[in-house]
Image (cartoon, rainbow, N blue to C red):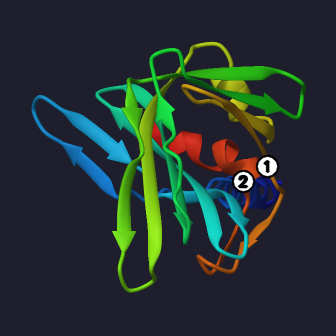
Amino acid sequence: MKNLVSALFFFIGIIANAQQKNCEYDVDEKTDSTFIKKTPDYLIHEKDFVNSSDFVFFSLINSDGTPYLNFQLLQKSKDFINPKCFDTSSKISLQLSNGKIVTLLSGGDICSQLNYAEKEKNNIRLLNNYFLFGKDGFEDLKKYPVTIMKVKYSTETVDYIFKKELKSEKINGTYSPEMYFINYLNCIE
């Protein structure tokens, strides 16, 4: 009986560790006055046309106990790219598989910056902003996959459909956008 109990605890430990994702950090610093952790950028959405492509990346940040979502929109095109902006009324709404909607609020006003890649002959715009998690829905994000994301920019709202599996040819990798928060929110708690 003692061996059976020991074996049971051993297998429960293996199963618990198998279900928990290993956390990687781009930044993991703690000093006497500050604490910050940032997960690596993760591809959430990719749209590739003949002369243009859009990429949405997420990363998670914990700054002195406050969790943030870092949202990045990278756009490349041979043609001119109109700027996208966030303002204080901007938000991200995440619809979960259980039907609940979780809203994150913009951390400030910012517009995408235009650059030119001489080698590729591409216009490039990068928009980067931080969004605050509300208390409502944080626990649901750890339990339910995201199906749709609505991003309210300053002048428009764009819907992004989350895929179970995203195979990127441009970034060379396979991603699971639906499961992003389930897999990584624990890394910034």
Q: Is residue 22 visible?
A: no
User: Is 175 left or right of 161, judged from the image as shown?
Assistant: left
Identify which residue is drawn at 34% across, 44% down.
37
Is residue 91 positioned above or below 116 on the image? above
Tag 1–tag 2 contact (CB < 8 Å): yes
The residue wearing badge 1 is 162
Three-letter amino acid code of the residue under disc 1 = Phe
- Who is closer to the viewer here, 113 or 169? 113
Residue 31 image-quadrant placement: top left
182 or 149: nearer the viewer? 149
Residue at left offset 77%, top offset 21%: 101
Q: Residue at x 55, y 72 (%)?
A: 78
Q: What kind of element bears circle 1?
A: loop
Q: From the viewer's perspective, tell me whether residue 65 is left or right of residue 186.
A: left
Measured along the vertical axis of the image, is residue 118 above or below residue 53?
below
- Residue 129: x and y in percent read 42, 37
Residue 105 in sight from this viewpoint: yes
Give the crowd class for mark 2: few <14, some 14-19, many >=20 residues within 10 Å. Answer: many
Using the image, determine if residue 65 lies above or below residue 18: above
Name the residue located 68 percent from the left edge and 80 percent from the top edge. Answer: 169
Examine the image and state in which quarter residue 152 appears. Answer: top right
Whichever of labels 1 and 2 marks the residue nearer the N terminus, that label is: 1
Amino acid under label 2?
Pro
The residue identified by callout 2 is: 177
Q: Position of residue 174 (x, y in %)?
A: 70, 73
Which x, y percent locates residue 102? 70, 22
Give the structural element (helix, strand or loop) at label 2. Answer: helix
